[in-house]
Image (spheres, grey):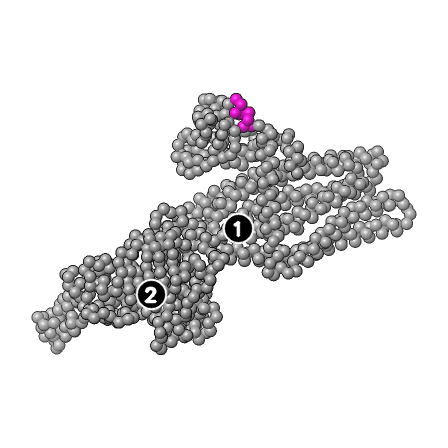
């Protein structure tokens, strides 16, 4: 194949070199308009007339001032060996990155120019590119065939493939007999003239039968292989979906969901295209070409076969040269389609913000700019396809005309009969038709390979977080038999957790989020972690659940390193209540059932009641069966959060993790959510991340984390009693000041209301029930005597009720500590 391609491409060295240049190198900008030598040196090699039409115009300062990266040729010892990305500031001069041996302005002179445009080197590069492309396509085909020949649900596929291939062979053999039988019938009718038509009629009957059986075999092939293809497509889609769910969290941080959706849809189509093009069309087409060439050699001579093979070789070389160029355009189209899909999904996900800021017109303009770039690239791709088809038709027309002229010459010399000429024309047409298919099939095969490339890279990649070969289940005891019996006495269960000198840095980042942190949590202990934003609090939960791996140190549960625990066992024993309630666009029942897919209806209902969803269910017409819409749009934030709590109750995990659950809730909803979480946390090891300090005062221990380190820990009462405590300082800024502000606002509201009442009493003098201006009404006295709105700390009572092991002697109630701090601020 390489030899054939090399011989065929020699007359078109300039064109092949131009195709390679347009595939990898953009023309350099002219650095000196007055110097024709420098202008010619900075231009790419000569190219066909049609290429400048479709090649992207050189990026100028006027057309695109902020182009981040451009392709520039790189010269090493005067040879053009590849391209390198270079940065440009968008200025008027953009010089190429060159080595020390190359001219400073990027020009080539003398021997360097001759070596750069060496025809042998260009042909060798072209042939290597062809081999590389089809070698990759071969790997794709082998990978695709593995989905239809082995694995679950493909038991009968090998037999179906054999039946399909047998039908293909029978169809092609019968199709070859159709023109042969017709030619013999014509010759018989010419010879017998007015004699009996028995033989011609039999031949015509055979002609019709062969044509009918050929069509029947084609349909058998289509039906049998369709069964094979659908099963393979199902396995491929399932494999992609499974791998996407296994990939680490950092992958989704750097990859937009819209791009994944577009890539998946494109890969799904590419799977069907490559499979169809390879098995259903390409292999049968090559078989038909071989069969036809055998008949031509047997009936018309080897010179006709040689001319046919030359036409085929020129056709394939031209198709491949254009395909290499089209692959570059196809990749550009794919990138722009990914950008369009990502922007589309992102805009729709933030539709409320767009409307509230009245920026719909702005978003339309940005989206239209992407569509314009995509349209330009699609036009270039379509024009290249038109040029490909035009060139193929020219080659076919010239070749077919030459071959028919050769057959007509044989008829005039008596070497071929009229019927033989008809068969010759019909069989040539059958060969020409596969020629058209070959070009289309090879193009589809290469395009499908490009479309599948991204998903195959994902399938070949290994998740950053995966089970080790010797991973074991987590050795842990369940907290209780019945997760819904909150009133029955239960002994303390859960698991011990330890962070042993843990450090962590996010991928592609130099900032250390967790810095040599050590922390021990006892079995059944309720621990709250507080601190400023970006201090690494939520990262600890991600390390504990193995969404990320620690850069250094160990995370232990009951003495087992989480990296030595099977992921399924680890996450089975951990329940998570996230900051942003994550719900599906399904019924409330299905969202709660997600915590334990084996639970019955009674447990699901009881979990909802224990999570405080009773009032919500009473308002909904279908109760638990109510569909909540996309992202739970029909529910409030607190109601969605209660669904996640009900999900955790149903799961009944020994370890409970809560990540800033009440950060965006009002005080009343916060109090209810905290009460529900405290019920769930009983008998478990719980770890709570919080910004609202009023929600963590019922914890056994509070950990203050700043800059990835533990700076303070202790019981809530002890930390609040310590005037130098970091937690007390945070409390003073947040809770006490908010409490003081609420008192001042309530006092101002009461004074304004009393003044309004005195004015109304003054206007209604000499009427019954008038109260003296100097004596406030009983209503005002009652209102002024009412206690101020209690803070969440006072509602919780004394700190001695918050601990599991009882409070230490001498600890003050929470209300006394709060009032003392309020007094000190005043």
Q: Which residues are magenta?
A: 110-117
Whole-percent x, y for residue 73 in the image: 49, 32
Whole-percent x, y for residue 499 in the image: 35, 58
Residue 617 visible, this angle: no
Q: Is residue 738 above or below residue 416?
A: below
Marker count (numbered): 2
In reply to whether residue 459 is colored magenta, the answer given is no
Q: Is residue 443 above or below residue 477?
A: above
Query: Is 4 or 359 nearer to us in this picture?
Result: 4
Residue beneath the point at 54% across and 58% down: 238
Q: Residues within 10 Å of mark 2 (few under 14, many from 20)?
A: some
Residue 180 visible, this angle: yes
Q: CA distance from mark 1 to mark 2?
A: 41 Å
**Residue corresponding to mark 2:** 522
The reply to whether callout 1 and callout 2 are in contact (CB within 8 Å) is no
Q: Is residue 374 left or right of residue 607?
A: right
Q: Residues within 10 Å of mark 1 (few under 14, many from 20)?
A: few
Query: Is 590 or 498 nearer to us in this picture?
Result: 498
**Residue corresponding to mark 1:** 460
Residue beneath the point at 36% across and 75% down: 490
Q: Is residue 366 above or below residue 81?
A: below
């Amino acid at each position: 194949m390489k030899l054939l391609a090399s011989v065929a491409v020699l007359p078109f060295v300039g064109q092949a070199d131009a195709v390679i240049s347009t595939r990898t190198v953009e023309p350099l900008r002219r650095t000196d308009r007055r110097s024709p030598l420098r202008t010619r040196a900075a231009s790419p090699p000569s190219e066909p007339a049609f290429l400048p039409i479709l090649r992207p115009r050189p990026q100028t300062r006027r057309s695109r001032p902020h182009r981040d990266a451009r392709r520039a040729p790189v010269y090493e010892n005067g040879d053009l060996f590849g391209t390198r990305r270079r940065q440009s500031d968008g200025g008027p001069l953009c010089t190429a990155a060159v080595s020390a041996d190359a001219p400073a302005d990027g020009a080539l002179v003398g021997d360097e120019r001759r070596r750069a445009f060496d025809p042998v080197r260009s042909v060798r590069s072209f042939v290597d590119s062809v081999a590389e492309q089809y070698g990759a396509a071969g790997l794709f085909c082998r990978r695709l065939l593995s989905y239809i020949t082995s694995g679950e649900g493909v038991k009968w596929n090998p037999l179906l493939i054999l039946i399909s291939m047998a039908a293909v062979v029978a169809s092609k053999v019968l199709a070859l007999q159709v023109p042969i039988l017709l030619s013999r019938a014509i010759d018989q009718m010419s010879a017998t003239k007015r004699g009996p038509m028995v033989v011609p009629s039999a031949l015509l009957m055979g002609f019709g039968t062969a044509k009918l059986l050929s069509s029947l075999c084609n349909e058998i092939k289509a039906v049998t292989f369709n069964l094979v293809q659908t099963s393979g497509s199902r396995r491929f889609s399932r494999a992609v979906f499974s791998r996407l769910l296994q990939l680490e969290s950092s992958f989704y941080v750097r990859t937009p969901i819209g791009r994944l959706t577009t890539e998946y849809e494109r890969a799904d189509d590419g799977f069907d295209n490559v499979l169809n093009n390879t098995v259903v069309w390409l292999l049968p087409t090559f078989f038909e070409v071989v069969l036809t060439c055998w008949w031509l050699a047997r009936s018309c001579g080897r010179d006709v076969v040689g001319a046919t093979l030359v036409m085929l070789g020129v056709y394939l070389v031209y198709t491949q040269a254009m395909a290499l160029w089209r692959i570059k355009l196809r990749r550009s189209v794919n990138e722009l389609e990914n950008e369009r899909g990502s922007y589309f999904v992102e805009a729709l996900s933030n539709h409320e913000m767009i409307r509230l800021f009245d920026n719909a017109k702005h978003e339309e303009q940005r989206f239209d700019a992407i569509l314009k770039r995509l349209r330009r690239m699609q036009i270039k791709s379509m024009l290249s396809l038109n040029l490909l088809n035009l060139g193929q038709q020219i080659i076919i027309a010239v070749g077919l005309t030459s071959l028919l002229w050769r057959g007509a010459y044989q008829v005039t010399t008596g070497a071929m009969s009229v019927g033989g000429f008809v068969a010759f024309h019909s069989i040539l047409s059958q060969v020409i038709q596969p020629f058209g298919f070959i070009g289309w099939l090879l193009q589809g095969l290469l395009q499908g390979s490009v479309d599948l490339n991204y998903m195959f890279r994902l399938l070949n990649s290994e998740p950053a977080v995966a089970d080790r070969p010797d991973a074991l289940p987590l050795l842990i005891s369940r907290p209780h038999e019945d997760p819904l019996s909150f009133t029955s006495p239960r002994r303390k269960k859960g698991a011990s957790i330890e962070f042993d000198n843990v450090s962590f840095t996010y991928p592609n980042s130099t900032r250390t989020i967790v810095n040599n942190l050590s922390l021990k949590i006892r079995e059944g202990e309720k621990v709250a972690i507080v601190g400023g934003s970006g201090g690494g609090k939520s990262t600890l939960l991600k390390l504990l659940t193995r969404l990320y791996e620690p850069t250094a140190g160990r995370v232990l549960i009951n003495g087992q390193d989480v990296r030595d625990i099977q992921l399924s066992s680890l996450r089975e024993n951990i329940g998570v209540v996230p900051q942003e309630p994550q719900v599906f666009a399904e019924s409330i029942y299905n969202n709660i059932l997600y915590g334990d897919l084996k639970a019955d209806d009674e447990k699901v209902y009881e979990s909802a009641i224990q999570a405080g969803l009773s009032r919500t269910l009473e308002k909904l017409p279908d109760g638990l069966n109510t569909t909540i819409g996309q992202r739970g749009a029909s529910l409030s934030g607190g109601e969605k959060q209660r669904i996640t709590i009900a999900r955790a109750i149903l799961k009944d995990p020994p370890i409970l993790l809560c990540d800033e659950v009440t950060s965006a809730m009002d005080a009343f909803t916060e109090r209810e959510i905290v009460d529900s979480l405290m019920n769930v946390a009983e008998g478990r090891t719980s770890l709570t991340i919080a910004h609202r300090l009023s929600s963590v005062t019922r914890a056994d221990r509070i950990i203050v984390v700043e800059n990835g380190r533990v700076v303070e820990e202790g019981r809530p009462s002890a930390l609040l009693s310590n005037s130098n405590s970091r937690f007390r300082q945070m409390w003073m800024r947040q809770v006490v000041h908010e409490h003081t502000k609420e008192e001042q606002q309530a006092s101002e509201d009461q004074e304004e209301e009393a003044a309004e009442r005195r004015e109304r009493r003054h206007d209604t003098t000499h009427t019954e029930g008038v109260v003296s201006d100097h004596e406030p009404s009983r209503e005002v006295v009652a209102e002024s005597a009412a206690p101020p709105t209690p803070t969440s700390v006072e509602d919780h009572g004394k700190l001695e009720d918050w601990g599991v092991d009882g409070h230490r002697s001498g600890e003050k109630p929470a209300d006394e500590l709060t009032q003392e701090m309020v007094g000190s601020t005043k």
